[in-house]
Each structure stands twice: as C-alpha cells, then as structure tokens.
Image: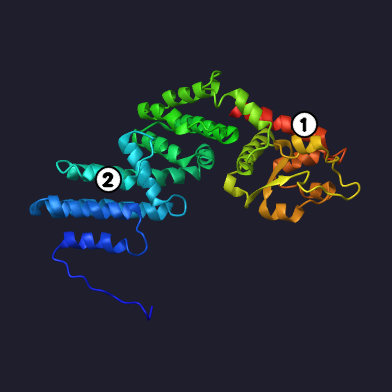
Amino acid sequence: MTKASCTTHVVKDESEAVQMFIFQNNRGKKPTNLEIIKAQFMYDIHLYVPVEDKQNLLSEITERFEHIYKSISKIEGNIDEDNVLNYTIKVYRNSLDEINSTDFVNKELGKADSCISFIRKFTQLLSSCFSQISNFLDETKKNITYHALLIAADRSIMFPFVIKALLKGMPQKELEELARALEQIFLRHRIIGTRANLLWRLNDSYKMMGNGAKNVVNHIQWMKSRKDWWGYWNNDELLRTLNMGMNHNTAKILLWKYENHLIQCGKAGYKVLRYDDIEQPHLEHIAPQTENKEPNNGYCPYDEDFYNRYLECLGNYLLLSGSHNMSLSNERFQKKRESYTYLQQQREVLGMTEKDPIWDKDKIQQRHSKIIDYLMQIL
C-alpha cells in the first residue's frame, strides 16, 4: 500500500465517467461480465436518451441493479452472478444454446433504434431471474425433490428450465414432476457417460415448454425408452453401466438416494436425509482398494475376477462421512463392521453379515442387485 499510486482522470460528463470505469477496470482485477454489461447499459442511456427522460430511466435501471445485488448477496457461494447472467440470456432467447454473454449484449446494443427498449426489457428479466433463483434455492432447503434435482443437475440446463417454469407460473405439483424428470435424465447422463449432447436433445422441449410440465416430462420419457441409435439413455444402457464401475461422485449421489429409500422402507417417523446432512460425504470401499494381507481379515481372496467384477461396483460401495472413512482405511472387515452404525445402508451391511461376518463376492453381489433393482425403478 505504501508503494501504491493514485491517478486522477478529469472527465466532462457521466458518460465519460462510465467509459473510464470500463477502461480502467480492464487494467486491474477483471470485473464480472455483469458489471461490464451494467456499465455499458448506463453508457448507452447517457448517450441515446434525451436529457428530460434520462434521470427517470437511470433511476429505474439503478433500482433494478440494487435488487439484483441484494439477490446476489443471498445466493453468493451457491451460484456465480455471471452464470445467472447466462441463464437469463437463455430465457430471453428461449434457447439452451450456449452464447457469449458480452457478445450477445453488444450485438443487441448495436441496434441503435431499439437498444434502450432492450435495456429496459433485459434488466427487468435479469432482476426477475435473480429473484427466481434465490426463491428456488430457498425452496430446496424445504423440498427434497428440488434439493435432489440441484444435487444431480447440469445447472446450465436445469436453471433455465426452472426459471422459465417459475416465470410462467407452473403449479407446484407440475414443477415437482418436471424436477423429477430432469433429475432422472441428468443422472442417466452421468451414469451412462455418453458423448451425446444432452443440451441439444432437450432444447426443443425447452422452447415449447409453457406453464405445464407434460411436454417436457413426456419428451424425457421418450428419450429413456428409445431402442434405436438415438437411445443413448435407455434402460438397456442404464442397466449395462450400473453394473460397471462409475465416477465416485455419481456413486455417492446414487447411494444417497438408496439411503433415503432404506429410510422410507424402515421405521415410521424417520425423516429423509438431505445430501448436505452427511458431513463431507465419502465413498467407502467395504472391501478396500488396497488388499488387506492379514490372516482372517474378513474378506474373500482378491483374484482377477474380484478385481474385474466386484471391487469397483455399487455393492461394494458405502456412503459415510469423511472423518469416518479416513478412520477405516483398509482395516480388517471386523473392525469396519463395528463402526457401521450411522446410516441405514451401514446398518444393512451389519445385518447382512450378522451370522457370517465375512464380506465376500456373494454378499457384494446380493447388495449390488438390491441397489440396482431400486435404481432401475426410480431412474
């Protein structure tokens, strides 16, 4: 700070001041696209709006951005403000296609005969989109269906759907149907790992979506049932890939859903579990990745068949907290088993091995089949 220098730039009017903001900010810490676009809006207002109308419009736009900044303070840490800007452009264009936000705004502002109309319309939508996202995030704290969608989603696709549905006044029951259908296709896409572009396959249904969920839900059901070359996300592909090893973050989400299934099938009165209720969720390999060489370790031999079919599968995965997982490492099964007292799936493993405390291929396959059967029903 003692070596810092200050410079003074004298400007003639507010439009030059806005220009100076844009030029000088680009020399230091890069401003967000939202900040740049706000400055461009103000500059164009100064440039094109008659003096007698200028103050009212400036006050209108300033008020909207004050509302936007209040919304940013609520969603900070969850969603980046420039991402919300991108979602707004998708809603404005009624298309999921990716497009550079500053290029889009510059192109619209270049239409001198309608640039002020665009500023009014776009800032109004931008303010509404920030509000809807803030409201939706609040709802995810109370509604497990919305929370599950948020955990599984590709947000660049999901949020435009949610925003558009909320802006069109979609009833809650249909919004929940939409959320479940989107969660299913997002999870299938994660599990199957196809290179097929999900955005393209959902874009038409997004464009046609009104205040009801039926068209989108039916389209996703159609995507799941295709048997031809288009059937990237069908049941055959889902079953095939569920029986293989998968991305560990995806496996954690699936086991979280399985945990809530066990809760709902168990004793009455147990509340379903939010994903963030689990402290640093980790994926535990019940039979450890590094073979335990101790005698009578509680595991079956690690032969080639075990490595190929059993080590990396859902039947051998277990969801637990980070601190719990780090305390276990590749311990003997008997010691691991004693600690499996928290989540319902841990107690399930405890029950499976009560009479025969050995974790072998048969028990892994038994548990794997049970998890797969459940996932095929809900996905």
Name the residue nearer the viewer: 16 or 252: 16
- Secondary structure of the residue carrying tag 1 is helix
Q: Amino acid at mark 2?
A: Val
Q: Quadrant of the N terminus?
A: bottom left
Q: Which residue does the image show at 31% across and 52% down from the upper left?
A: 67
As drawn, is 39 to the left or to the right of 287? left
Residue 124 in view, yes or no: no
What x and y, as percent, mark residue 7? Answer: 26, 74
Q: Residues within 10 Å of mark 2 (few under 14, many from 20)?
A: some
Q: Are marks 1 and 2 in contact (CB under 8 Å)?
A: no
Name the residue tied to disc 1.
Answer: 366
Q: Nearer the viewer, residue 77 or 360?
A: 360
| Left or right placement of residue 169 versus residue 238 in this view | left
Check residue 203 in the rendering and tell me which mark sits there, or answer none: none
N-terminal of the pair, mark 1 or mark 2, is 2
Question: Where does residue 159 sit, x and y in percent of width and height?
Answer: 42, 40
Left or right, 344 with respect to 31, comes to right
Q: Secondary structure at mark 2?
A: helix
Query: Percent x, y for residue 350?
Result: 79, 41
Question: Which residue does the numbered mark 2 point to in the structure image?
Answer: 105
- Type of the residue with mark 1: Gln
Q: Mark 1 or 2, which is nearer the eye?
A: 2
Graded by Cα atoms within 10 Å as few (under 14), some (14 to 19) or many (20 or more), the crowding at tag 1 reads: few
Give the position of the C terminus as an image quadrant: top right
Horizontal side of residue 324 vs 145, given as left or right: right
